[in-house]
């Protein structure tokens, strides 16, 4: 550590820096010389700090918007689901948000892809709960990865992991090998994530995400685990209260750049474009999520008023909350939530269907009711919707 401190002073005096101090690297050779954190380069340039301020402001707004929602379960149902869909799609696990909600409480008939994406959502929620017990650490990464993969995952013991280009099959990057090498690098990553630092937390999140991916500790699931850890990092630093930032939305929209910029850090020590990229992703998805929360809230108020006017005998605050928490609703969901017994619950959903709030979409034996306006909000960028009673 002391050596690195000496270097960074030297590097700061040596601007502008054209050399990167990065060790020799080759795509096909395990990168056991991956430098430990922190990076020796000066990262918080004026441009980075400016972008950081914007991202921090957007995130602070999101935190506040989320905290103002009386029913946190609605947020924890919607946003981790969107994040799960997008983050899994980055890894070519293709599902739709509708499918995920449809199978949320009945996974048996879901396709393997849907199950895997649903496990990502669980991993995010389990990971956030784990933060009560332990800090961000290697063990937490193992817990998250195990949940995502649905099998016990531990830091790699065997060589042979490579990252390849899907189309050409060419090797892009070969991560370090040897369990001890990986564990040492992870211990360094862990310290960097948890120790007090002068660096802005968002800059640290970006740096840690690169490092985690470069270490690539698992046989598979590294991308998704790393992206869950991004959310957990924000929660553990108090930048958001719950894992509701839909960060993978921005990453998948710029997926080629995500890969390119990760590689450029390894190949040429290009930290600044990487950090800038991540800050831009945070800013844009934080704003997107804040606006979406506001639209959902407005829809909830409108729906509540409409149901209360049209069928006062059916209305309850709990019922309205439930149809926002479960946009693919089963009669059993009402029973489980303690809203009504089965017979009465069935009449409630029928009434909500008659007045157009729900749409029946029964598959097989289970009657399924879709909250169409909410699904439209969740699956489209637009926050416009036709108000009930207008
Ligand atoms: N050049 C690179 N160096 C390090 N990590 C990379 C590089 N390019 C992509 N990645 C990361 O590797 C992930 C894919 O690794 P993988 O273990 O298959 O994860 P998953 O199973 O979640 O797809 C990508 O999502 C990305 O985060
Ligand atoms: Mg994979």
Image: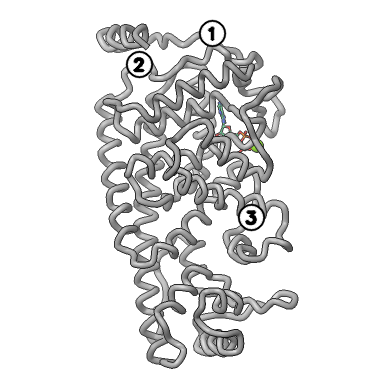
- Between 161 and 355, the one lying in front of the other is 161
Image coords of residue 86 (percent x, y): 55, 49
Say which mark, if any, is on residue 95.
Answer: 3
Distance, label 3 to label 2, CA atoms, is 40 Å
Task: Classify mark 1 as within 8 Å of ligand 1 or not, answering yes or no.
Answer: no
Image coords of residue 278 (percent x, y): 41, 36
Mark 1 / mark 3, whichever is N-terminal = 1
13 sits left or right of 365 in the view: left
Specify the quarter for ligand 2.
top right
- Asked which secondary structure carries label 3, the reply is loop
Distance, label 2 to label 1, CA atoms, is 17 Å
Image coords of residue 111 (percent x, y): 72, 57
Mark 3 / mark 2, whichever is N-terminal = 2
Residue pictured at 34% horizontal, 9% vertical: 2
Image coords of residue 45 (percent x, y): 27, 24
Pointer 3: residues within 10 angstroms few (<14), some, or many (20+)? many
Pointer 1: residues within 10 angstroms few (<14), some, or many (20+)? few
Q: Quadrant of the C terminus?
A: bottom left
On screen, residue 227 above or below 339: above
On screen, residue 96 above or below 272: below
- Between 116 and 259, the one lying in front of the other is 116
- Between 35 and 263, the one lying in front of the other is 35
Give the residue pinned by disc 2.
41
Mark 2 / mark 1, whichever is N-terminal = 1
Residue pictured at 50% horizontal, 34% vertical: 257
Give the residue pinned by disc 1.
24
- Asked which secondary structure carries label 2, the reply is loop
Query: Image quadrant of residue 272?
Result: top left
309 sits left or right of 325 in the view: left
Query: Image quadrant of residue 236?
Result: top left
Residue pictured at 38% horizontal, 91% vertical: 309
């Amino acid at each position: 550590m002391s050596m690195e401190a000496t270097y960074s002073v030297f590097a700061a005096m040596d601007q502008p820096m054209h050399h990167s101090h990065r060790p020799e690297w080759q795509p096909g050779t395990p990168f056991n010389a991956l430098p430990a954190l922190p990076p020796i380069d000066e990262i918080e340039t004026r441009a980075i700090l400016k972008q950081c301020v914007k991202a921090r402001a957007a995130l602070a707004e999101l935190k506040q918007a989320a905290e103002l929602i009386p029913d946190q379960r609605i947020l924890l149902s919607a946003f981790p689901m969107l994040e799960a869909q997008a983050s899994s799609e980055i890894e070519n696990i293709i599902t739709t948000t509708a499918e995920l909600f449809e199978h949320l409480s009945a996974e048996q008939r879901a396709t393997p892809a849907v199950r895997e994406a649903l496990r990502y959502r669980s991993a995010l929620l389990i990971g956030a709960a784990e933060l009560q017990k332990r800090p961000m650490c290697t063990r937490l990464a193992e817990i998250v990865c195990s949940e995502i993969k649905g099998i016990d995952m531990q830091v790699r013991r065997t060589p042979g992991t490579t990252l390849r280009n899907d189309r050409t099959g060419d090797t892009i990057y070969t991560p370090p090998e040897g369990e001890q090498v990986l564990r040492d690098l992870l211990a360094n990553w862990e310290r960097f994530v948890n120790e007090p630092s002068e660096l802005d937390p968002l800059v640290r999140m970006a740096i840690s995400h690169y490092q985690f991916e470069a270490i690539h500790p698992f046989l598979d699931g590294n991308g998704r685990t790393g992206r869950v850890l991004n959310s957990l990092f924000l929660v553990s630093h108090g930048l958001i209260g719950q894992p509701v930032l839909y960060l993978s939305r921005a990453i998948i929209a710029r997926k080629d750049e995500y890969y390119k910029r990760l590689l450029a850090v390894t190949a040429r020590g290009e930290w600044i474009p990487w950090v800038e990229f991540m800050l831009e992703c945070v800013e844009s998805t934080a704003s997107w999520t804040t606006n979406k929360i506001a639209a959902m809230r407005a829809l909830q108020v409108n729906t509540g008023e409409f149901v209360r006017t049209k069928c006062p005998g059916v209305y309850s605050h709990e019922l309205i909350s439930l149809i926002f928490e479960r946009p693919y609703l089963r009669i059993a969901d009402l029973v489980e939530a303690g809203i009504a017994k089965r017979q009465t619950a069935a009449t409630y959903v029928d009434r909500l269907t008659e007045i157009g709030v729900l749409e029946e979409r029964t598959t097989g034996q289970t009657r399924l009711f879709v909250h169409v306006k909410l699904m439209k909000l969740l699956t489209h960028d637009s926050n416009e919707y036709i108000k009930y009673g207008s």
